[in-house]
Amino acid sequence: MTEPILSARGVSKRFGGVQALKDVSFDLYPGEVLALAGDNGAGKSTLIKAISGVHHPEEGSITFDGRDLSGLLPGAVRDLGIETIYQDLALADNLDVGLNLFLGREIVRHLLGFLPVLDRTKMRTESAAILQNLGIRVPDPTLPVGNLSGGQRQAIAISRAIYWNARLLIMDEPTAALGVPEQRLVRDLIIRLRERQVAIIYISHNLNDIFAVSDRILVLERGRKAGERKASETDDNEVVKLMMGSA
């Protein structure tokens, strides 16, 4: 049987008098899409930040590929292969696709053997290759990403994570504020990543999106695990009841 790539056991986190997470446990397997569902304040953001190293749980443990993530900072977590794409995407609107793909990890070459300059050609070539490999179409990769559509920008953020060998991709509301065609683009990309055995944690308030792409649904309610269901064995009515704490 395949071993889980991510395991959380008894994870709890408080902020002053607020219990943000209480005794949350789950497993995630390679090539699986796990949806996190819950109302505002349910603990979804706190949980993904605990995984990505932004917050450190006061109780419980989180392991990735058998390694304890306790005390690791976000940079160290990313180095292990966990990438998080937040709603703001962390893209530089004034830079082109290639420079955004390598933002903070720029490729440099040396003029005269010692003078470092950005190797824009190399970065654009690499970015074009990864976009083509993932089946992502951008009309002009030399344009600033601020000129691209919301779906294309989301695809660029996903491409950046995959280029840096993400084995676990955490996506926070990836289809929020997107039109129907752009939502379809992002959903199709998630399905292709699943086929590549990338594990995905998918946060969304859109139940249609959740059922379209997820294998399992983990429902949080006021910081606790209200339920966990296979997407094929539940429906939106049951998920809503779990979110409301009435199931």
Image (tube, helix red, strand yellow):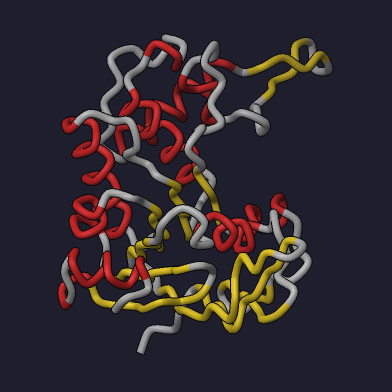
In the rendered image, which quarter contains the C terminus? bottom left
**Is residue 162 placed above or below 156 in the rendered structure?**
below
Left or right of residue 47, residue 58 in this image? right
In the rendered image, which quarter contains the N terminus? bottom left
User: Where residue 20 sits: x, y (%)?
Assistant: 61, 65
Q: Residue at x 19, y 52 (%)?
A: 208
In the picture as drawn, the residue positioned furthest to the bottom comes out as: 1
User: Where residue 85 sits: x, y (%)?
Assistant: 50, 43
User: Where residue 200 sits: x, y (%)?
Assistant: 40, 59
**Is residue 144 placed above or below 49 in the rendered structure?**
above
Left or right of residue 191, residue 97 in this image? right
Q: Residue at x 71, y 67 (%)?
A: 14
User: Where residue 38 sits: x, y (%)?
Assistant: 40, 61
Q: Residue at x 81, y 13 (%)?
A: 115
Which residue is nearer to you in this view: 30 or 247?
Answer: 247
- Residue 21, image quadrant: bottom right
Which residue is nearer to you in this view: 219 or 143?
Answer: 219
In the picture as drawn, the residue positioned furthest to the right comes out as: 114
Q: Residue at x 56, y 74 (%)?
A: 65
